[in-house]
Amino acid sequence: MRLPAAHCVLLLVGTCAVTMTALADEAAGVVKTVKGQVRIERAGGDLSAAIGNEVFGNDRIVTGPQSSVGITLRDTTQLSAGAETVLELNKFAFDTTTHAGVIDASVKRGSLAVISGKLAKANPDAVRFSTPTTTLGVRGTAFIIDVGGNGEKAHWTRPCHSPR
């Protein structure tokens, strides 16, 4: 028995939606470094960040005074948040086979250094970092975002290249 083309399309779309939902439920990354007071806020409650803690899409990471946190996402993107930073991981999904997915994060206050990973290299349009007044598209590079009380600055740096 052959399925009509419309049924095949619906089956394919449904499978893709289920796959992306499953990817979104996986951990976005892991805490690699912690200095001082760092809190992870999520729907199930807050916890003090510790090395090895998983972070998920929809988590909010808050650093205290003289504190910092380093997080490596599953696509190898590296995030380093400085003192008194509020970082929201609005959405994260990554397929390790196809490198498809999305990173959507917001820096509400403080500073964030980013070294982009596999997702930005494979699909730059799928990576977005926002501040209260700006949205940055990432094109496979390293950059720093600094959101302060007296305004906002965004700094971009060139990617680091190893000598050949």
Image: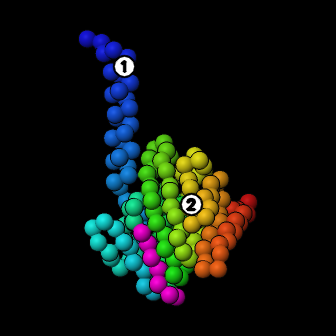
Residue at image coords 36%, 72%: 41
Confirm or deny contact between disc 1 and disc 2 (CB under 8 A).
no
Residue at image coords 36%, 19%: 6
| Residue 86 shows in the view | yes
Location of residue 84 in the rendering, given as x and y in whole percent from the top left corner: 51, 81
Q: How far, Cα to Cα, is label 1 from label 2? A: 37 Å
Q: Which quadrant holds residue 140?
A: bottom right
Tell me the crowding category of disc 1: few under 14, some 14 to 19, or many 20 or more residues within 10 angstroms, Cα based: few
Q: Is residue 129 magenta?
A: no
> Start and end of the magenta stretch?
60-66
Q: Is residue 1 above or below residue 92?
A: above
| Residue 162 shows in the view | no
Per the image, label 2 sits on a secondary structure element best described as: strand
The mark total stands at 2
Horizontal placement of 134 versus 60: left or right?
right
Location of residue 87 in the rendering, given as x and y in whole percent from the top left corner: 49, 70
Residue at image coords 54%, 68%: 107
- For badge 2, the amino acid type reads Phe
Where residue 6 is drawn, which disc sits there? Answer: 1
Q: Is residue 62 magenta?
A: yes
Q: Which comes before the other along the chain, label 1 or label 2?
A: 1
Per the image, label 1 sits on a secondary structure element best described as: helix
Q: Which quadrant holds residue 92?
A: bottom left
Q: Which quadrant holds residue 163?
A: bottom right
Location of residue 69 in the rendering, given as x and y in whole percent from the top left corner: 48, 76
- For badge 1, the amino acid type reads Ala
**Residue position for label 2:** 129
